[in-house]
Image (spheres, coloured by chain):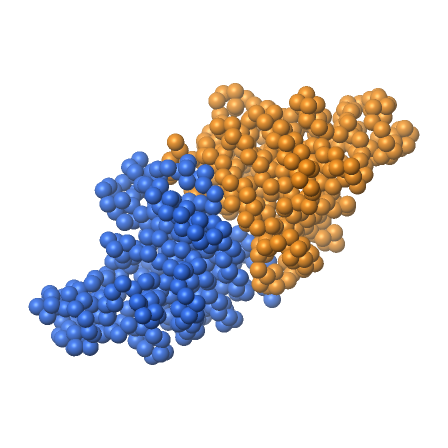
Chain colours: A orange, B blue
Amino acid sequence: MAQLPLQKTIGIIGGGQLGKMLIEASRPLNFHYHILENDAHCPASHLADKVIVGKLTDDTKIRELAESTDVITYEIEHVNSETLLDLEAKGKLIIPSPKALQIIQDKGKQKQFYSKHFIKTAPYYIVNSDSDWEIALNNISGEKLAVKLCKGGYDGKGVVIANRSDIINGTYPFSEPCMVEKFVPNVRELAIIVAQDQQGNITEFPEVEMFFSPVSNLVEFLFSPSRFNAEIIAEAKKLAHQVVASFGTPGLFAVELFVDQNNQVWVNETAPRPHNSGHHTIEACYTSQYEQLNRILAGYPLGDTSLIQPSAMINITGPTDFTGPYQLDNLDDLLKTTGVYVHLYNKADSKPHRKLGHITVLDTDMESLLAKAEKVKSMIKIIPA
Amino acid sequence: MAQLPLQKTIGIIGGGQLGKMLIEASRPLNFHYHILENDAHCPASHLADKVIVGKLTDDTKIRELAESTDVITYEIEHVNSETLLDLEAKGKLIIPSPKALQIIQDKGKQKQFYSKHFIKTAPYYIVNSDSDWEIALNNISGEKLAVKLCKGGYDGKGVVIANRSDIINGTYPFSEPCMVEKFVPNVRELAIIVAQDQQGNITEFPEVEMFFSPVSNLVEFLFSPSRFNAEIIAEAKKLAHQVVASFGTPGLFAVELFVDQNNQVWVNETAPRPHNSGHHTIEACYTSQYEQLNRILAGYPLGDTSLIQPSAMINITGPTDFTGPYQLDNLDDLLKTTGVYVHLYNKADSKPHRKLGHITVLDTDMESLLAKAEKVKSMIKIIPA
């Protein structure tokens, strides 16, 4: 049985807001954190015990991180999974396993993984070179197609909705390998965060309903519980559970799903880390996604993921009209509002669509929650400093 | 109006668990913290940006802390208030004002302050030398007397219940100045944390009902809301509010009160800092005592102090049978229980009665809360590592 106080040191590849919040959630555990990040002044830097400055893909730096830590995790997919695989083979504890990471890093492999495990997902075809486009078009129906770069996409980048006619005319969305998928209009989106501990136990967080910006492809707004019916929620939970059970590694995963107008549910994609769709769990759930991952890393049992109150989360992103130092306007009024939690990520400059922070809103019932969240949303304003 | 991100640096005199939790609550503010503490490995050390190692009474070290920070607070009363008074006179922002601290540091002056402001407190007499005892006994009735050292008492130390007959026989509890108070048997204890912001607004947290260990004089167990009737609660809130309004300085204060068998309510004493009786607010209230103090230090408005759920708090203290490295037993079972939050203070060694951590318990109603808290209490066991 695990005992406290442990003096474990956790290595995090990446020092962005997810790493920052992971460290903030370490309350009962008193862990130490070493992070690897390109930018010495990254969001998590002033909370970490040690910052190794280097690229997230740098073999030597990752091995340096492994030397000084008991377990390694990552808060972004774009890390050197080859190095992690080698370290894992040599006995280093890496959570989630880099085997799962390698599947997720490549959207084509990720889709094939779902197919192999009979997990419902949209029809797709993998385009490795221009000559594959014709077969892709034969396989995927519809005038519009969702096209995603197999590798390197992030935060809404690397995804386009392409016209069949343009592709027929030889205008291809990407020249690198990509995954072409049936485009389903008017889908609603939900996400379920699923955690697997080192003993193989799996638990889900309550589902969230998400709203994306049509401009930036970023989550703008979400709330939990969702307004989907019980059948849809049960189906989504089943699928999310199936994804994480199939990966068969401890870790925390965010499974994003689509629901169409006929109430069909399928898996869109999975992230092997804490996720924007789980920020609200810090205040809204008995155990947050960040504490849950800390527990998993430490070998502790999973915590209860139930919601204490209905909650909403609103991203604070950089406006499109300036780049540089910024301020959050209306802060005093936000701080005066009951059940409003402002999180800022300690980023020096605003850039268009850059995630600068988020606000979690709690309330006792859905109706007042949504009204309050709308009001808070209208108050968020990033202005030049 | 205050704007984010601010890059303020807060100085804390003392780096114990209260300082640790103050830093942990800085989420939205991204402050930097410099602490002054005798022990470089104190609980708050690995969260602070800078640790100045030195005595809390060291004039030079306190001035060094003032040099590098925008505002100074303290998490313990036993600091050099003379230095702080001088710094304040020179324009340094110190919260709460050292004028209030100097009154509180001396239990005699504290009592005189309550008298001066017509705040209900138990009859008392200040004994400055052995020759004062006779007058004290003439002024305070009862076979038993509560006697407190005017200066230096802490965490149950410096307080004795003395017999009148022993004092008559010349056996004095203390040789230093002390405050002799009417001893009222079978009192119940409650505490109310009150915050005053830099604009002079005052807000109270919901009252807590406290249970002390008869052996160590330490808070063993508390819950909130209390089971007192509405009249008692209203009277207690009025008194607590009056105390903080009379101090007339921004800050966070814990006002401890007694209630006797006739439902009389009076002020026992006040602490000018976050307090053991407010640990539960981290999880139980919309705004915690620690976030509230951070807001005050930053010049931000106060947050809503309402309870989200009924809660209990249980201290984890060192057992009397050993000193040295320790473990918390039953940790896995505690972590598996819904609404149970384990906080450990990162202290290397257990000592008899030493505060090593606490556990907050949440539940939806009082009955299940008390049952769960009793169960959790029985599970807490510190064993040698």
Q: Could you tell me residue B50's position as x and y percent?
A: 43, 51
Q: Nearer the viewer, residue B166 or A3?
A: B166
Residue at 63% over, 38% down:
A192
Residue at 14% over, 68% down:
B164
Q: Nearer the viewer, residue A117 or B371?
A: B371
Q: Could you tell me residue B126's position as x and y percent?
A: 22, 73
| Quadrant of the image occupied by residue B94 | bottom left
Q: Nearer the viewer, residue B190 or B95?
A: B190
Q: Is residue A132 in view?
A: yes
Q: Nearer the viewer, residue A332 or A363?
A: A363
Q: Could you tell me residue B194's position as x and y percent?
A: 44, 66
Q: Is residue B67 in view?
A: no
Residue at 79% over, 41% down:
A186
From the viewer's perspective, is B45 left or right of A25? left
Above or below, B209 relative to B326: below
Q: Could you tell me residue B261's position as x and y percent?
A: 30, 67
What count of labels does the image hold? 0
Residue at 80% over, 23% down:
A129
| Quadrant of the image occupied by residue B158 | bottom left
In the image, farthest residue toward the left: B169
Above or below, B287 relative to B179: above
Above or below, A202 relative to A213: above
Q: Quadrant of the C terminus of chain B?
A: top left
Q: Quadrant of the N terminus of chain B?
A: bottom right
Above or below, B36 relative to A239: below
